[in-house]
Image: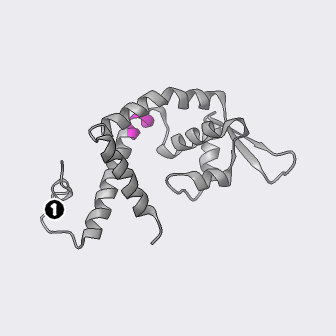
Amino acid sequence: MTILRDDLRQTKAFQSLHQEAFLNVARTEAVLHDGLDQVLGPLGLSLTQYNVLRMLRGAGIGGLCRNEIRDRLITRMPDVSRLLDRMEAAGLVHRVRSAEDRRLVNTTLTERGGALVDELDAEVAAVHAKQLGHLSEPQLRSLIELLSIARSPS
C-alpha cells in the first residue's frame, strides 16, 4: 500500500483529513486514467470519446441526442458538439436530424465505431483487472459505496 504523502514526497502533514481524502481521490483518478490512456491513446481516442462510444453502443440503433450524451458523460465537457464533430470526422459516429422534429439530432455509432468499441472491451477489462484486481470483492463494493456517498449532495 502506498501512502499519498510518500508518493508526493511531501514532508508536511495535509491541512485537513478532507484535503488528504480529496487529493487521494484525485491522484487515484490520474493513475487509473493513465492506464486507459495507454490503451486508447495509440488509437487516437480520448477517455471521453471512448465513453461516448460505449454510451452509444448501449443506446442501440436509436442513438442519443447531444444533450443526453452531455448529461451522461463521466467527465463533464463544455462543448459536446465539437467532440461529436471530431468523432464524426473520424468515422466513428453518424448524426441524423429527426424528420419529426428538426431540432433533434440523434447520434449513432457507425459500423467502424461499433467495431472499435467492441474490440476494446477485452483490453479495457484487462486494464481494469490489472489496476483493481488486487482488491477483494468486499473491498471493491466498499470502494464503490464510499465513492457514491462522496458524490452525493450534502
Q: Is residue 146 left or right of residue 76?
A: left
Where residue 141 sits: x, y (%)? 37, 48
Q: For the residue labelled by badge 1, is the local secondary structure a helix, a strand or a loop?
A: loop
Which residue appears at 49% of the width and 38% of the height? 45
Where residue 115 sits: x, y (%)? 58, 26
Q: Which residues are magenta?
A: 36-41
- Outermost residue on the right side: it is 100
Asked if the stretch drawn in magenta spans residue 138, the answer is no
Residue in front for this viewpoint, 154 or 91: 154
- From what the image shows, is residue 60 above or below residue 3? above
Residue in front for this viewpoint, 34 or 13: 13
Classify mark 1: residues with Cα within 10 Å, few (<14), some (14-19) or many (20+). Answer: few
The residue that disc 1 covers is: 10
Number of disc labels: 1
Magenta-highlighted stretch: main secondary structure? helix
The amino acid type, in three-letter code, at marker 1 is: Gln
Residue in front for this viewpoint, 134 or 46: 134
- From what the image shows, is residue 139 above or below residue 23? above
Asked if the stretch drawn in magenta spans residue 38, the answer is yes
Which residue appears at 19% of the width and 53% of the height? 7
- From what the image shows, is residue 137 above or below residue 113? below
